Image: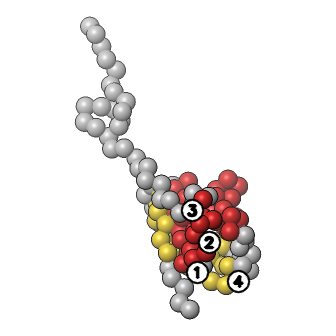
Amino acid sequence: MQIPITVGRRKNAVARVKLSDGSGKVTINNRELENYFPLAILRSEVLKPFEVTETLGRYDAAIRVLGGGTTGQAGAVSLGIARSLVALDEDLRTVLRNAGLLTRDPRMVERKKYGQKKARKRFQFSKR
């Protein structure tokens, strides 16, 4: 069976995920998971789709991530892994959907407006 490459996005980060049968090794941009995401919170977010579906040691993941910061990249990887698991086994869709792992987070950075310091912050108002 051909294993599809799935895409996960969050903020400006894009992750391409390819799962294969293995021992649970996760490689991100040719680096180990522990080296790429040193924070335990981000590592747990990346591995959450495996934990929810109880497939933690069953698949190896080869992931390429571009753009964004660490939090956005972790969210993108998580969504990509969840979509890959659904592509491999359609029965996992309801479990991942109930955990909220198949929903793409639509929140993006609001653009800066002219005449203002940032998106919503104004310059200081002077009455006199």
The residue most toward the top is 128
Using the numbered discs, state the Cα–Cα distance from disc 1 to disc 2 in whole angstroms.
9 Å
**For mark 1, does the 10 Å Cα neighbourhood hold few (<14), some (14 to 19), or many (20 or more) residues?**
some
- Give x and y (percent) for residue 66: 47, 66
- Give x and y (percent) for residue 109: 40, 47
Using the numbered discs, state the Cα–Cα distance from disc 4 to disc 3 in whole angstroms.
25 Å
Q: Kindly indicate whether the residue at mark 1 contacts the one at mark 4 (C-beta within 8 angstroms).
A: no
Q: Earlier in the sequence, mark 4 or mark 1?
A: 4
Using the numbered discs, state the Cα–Cα distance from disc 3 to disc 1 in whole angstroms.
15 Å
Query: Please, is residue 42 above or below residue 35 in the view?
Result: above
**Label number found at residue 92:** 2
Tell me what residue is drawn at x 68 percent, y 58 percent: 44
Circle 4 residue: 22
**For mark 2, does the 10 Å Cα neighbourhood hold few (<14), some (14 to 19), or many (20 or more) residues?**
some
Q: State the SS at label 3.
A: helix
- Residue 3's image quarter? bottom right
In the shown orientation, is residue 100 left or right of residue 9?
right
* Residue 55 seen anywhere in this rendered image of the structure: yes
Q: State the SS at label 4.
A: loop
Using the numbered discs, state the Cα–Cα distance from disc 2 to disc 4 in whole angstroms.
19 Å
Q: How is the image coloured?
A: secondary structure
Look at discs 4 and 3 and give the one toward the viewer.
3
